[in-house]
């Protein structure tokens, strides 16, 4: 029997990815992915298209979203999986998040203008199918030759502490978890080792996430060292969290690929043990 390949964290043009939902699903099929979650930033607008493509490709699609939150003046991402995408509380939260993102984008555009880069908001908007994100500004800065690559755009202009960074005002983690649960889903702490904080702060974040009702933690991602994966596995067990896997794919590149090296250590309970019932209940 062929082992299922899961990827429960991916992005499309519905947020800051570069592939359409259909193209993303097609790439997942090429990578032999069996179960896929489309988890666009604060948006479920790509799920209908992705579901049609997944049915044709023989992939099981899980409703997903990556909710932006704030914790101790840091941006933290919470992935929701297996929810009812039409639930009124989830819809209301995502509408509020969209308003926050739009206002932030306008302010980033103004800050870029002040440092000598006019019309950045309009330029970024032309690159976005949905809400304008910092990634779209980064791509615009590359396009006009202001920086060599997107990483440089963040390092020079867009990252926290840089001249064009704008504090967001995202939802709190407890609100994100509660809303995901109200919509019938599971809440997962995304890519914990990507946040620039010490292990002591990370343990505090994970502990509070669990106390607030969080369900899982991303243990497996692309480009990890074995030590990093084992550390996350140990924390998953210590705090009683299910283990999730996700590439956090945004665009084709050499080091991040859909479904690549996404396996859990044997001692971790997979989040899909809980998701299976939700998959059966919410197939549409």
Image (cartoon, helix red, strand yellow):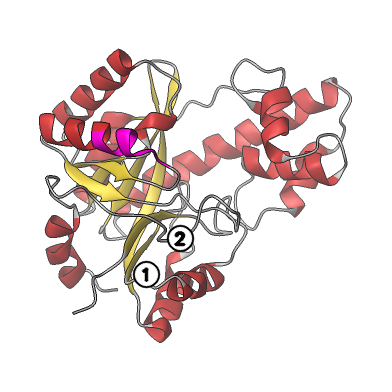
Residue 55, given in percent of the width and then of the height, sits at 37, 82
Label 2 residue SS: loop
Closer-to-camera residue (39/32): 32
Q: Is residue 141 left or right of residue 78?
A: right
Say whether disc 2 or disc 1 marks the residue closer to the N-terminus.
1
Residue at the spot x=85%, y=34% of the render? 146
Are the residues flagged by discs 2 and 1 in contact, CB closer than 8 Å? yes
Please say whether residue 167 is visible from this viewpoint. yes
Closer-to-camera residue (218/124): 218
Q: Which residue is mark 2?
A: 258
The CA span between labels 2 and 1 is 8 Å
Instruction: Decide: few, some or many residues near mark 2? Use Cα within 10 Å; few <14, some 14-19, many ≥20.
Output: many
Where 16 falls versus 134 (above or below)? below
Instruction: Look at the image and tell me in which quarter the N terminus lies.
Output: bottom left
Label 1 residue SS: loop
Where 241 falls versus 275 (above or below)? above
Residue at the spot x=30%, y=42% of the render? 218
Residue 82, given in percent of the width and then of the height, sits at 25, 59
Q: Is residue 127 left or right of residue 146?
A: left
Q: Which mark is residue 211?
A: none
Closer-to-camera residue (181/217): 217
Name the outermost residue toward the bottom: 56
Q: Which residue is mark 1?
A: 33
Query: Does residue 31 belong to the magenta stretch?
Result: no
Q: Main secondary structure of the magenta part?
A: helix
Closer-to-camera residue (106/18): 18
Q: Is residue 75 left or right of residue 172?
A: right
Where 145 falls versus 34 (above or below)? above
Residue 52, given in percent of the width and then of the height, sits at 43, 80
Which range is magenta? 224-230
Where 97 falls versus 74 (above or below)? below
Please say whether residue 107 is visible from this viewpoint. no
């Amino acid at each position: 029997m062929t082992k299922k390949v899961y990827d429960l964290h991916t992005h499309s043009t519905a947020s800051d990815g570069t592939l359409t939902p259909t193209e993303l699903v097609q790439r997942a099929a090429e990578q032999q992915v069996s179960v896929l979650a489309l988890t666009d930033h604060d948006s479920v607008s790509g799920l209908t298209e992705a579901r049609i493509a997944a049915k044709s490709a023989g992939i099981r699609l899980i409703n997903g979203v990556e909710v932006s939150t704030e914790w101790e003046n840091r941006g933290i991402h919470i992935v929701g999986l297996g929810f009812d995408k039409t639930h009124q509380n989830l819809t209301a939260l995502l509408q509020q998040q969209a308003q926050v993102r739009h206002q932030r984008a306008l302010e980033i555009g103004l800050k870029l203008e002040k440092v000598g880069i006019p019309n950045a908001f309009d330029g970024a908007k032309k690159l976005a199918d949905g809400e304008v994100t910092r990634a779209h500004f980064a791509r615009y800065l590359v396009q006009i030759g202001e920086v060599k690559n997107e990483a440089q755009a963040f390092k020079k202009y867009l990252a926290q502490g840089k001249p064009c960074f704008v504090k967001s005002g995202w939802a709190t983690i407890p609100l994100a978890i509660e809303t995901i649960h109200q919509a019938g889903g599971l809440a997962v702490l995304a890519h914990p080792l990507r946040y620039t904080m010490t292990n002591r702060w990370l343990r505090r974040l994970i502990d509070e996430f669990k106390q607030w009702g969080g369900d899982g933690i991303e243990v497996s991602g692309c480009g990890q060292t074995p030590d990093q994966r084992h550390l996350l596995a140990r924390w998953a067990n210590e705090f009683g969290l299910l283990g999730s896997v996700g590439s956090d794919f945004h665009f084709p590149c050499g080091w991040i690929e859909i479904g690549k090296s996404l396996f859990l250590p044997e001692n971790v309970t997979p989040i899909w043990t809980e998701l299976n019932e939700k998959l059966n209940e919410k197939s549409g």
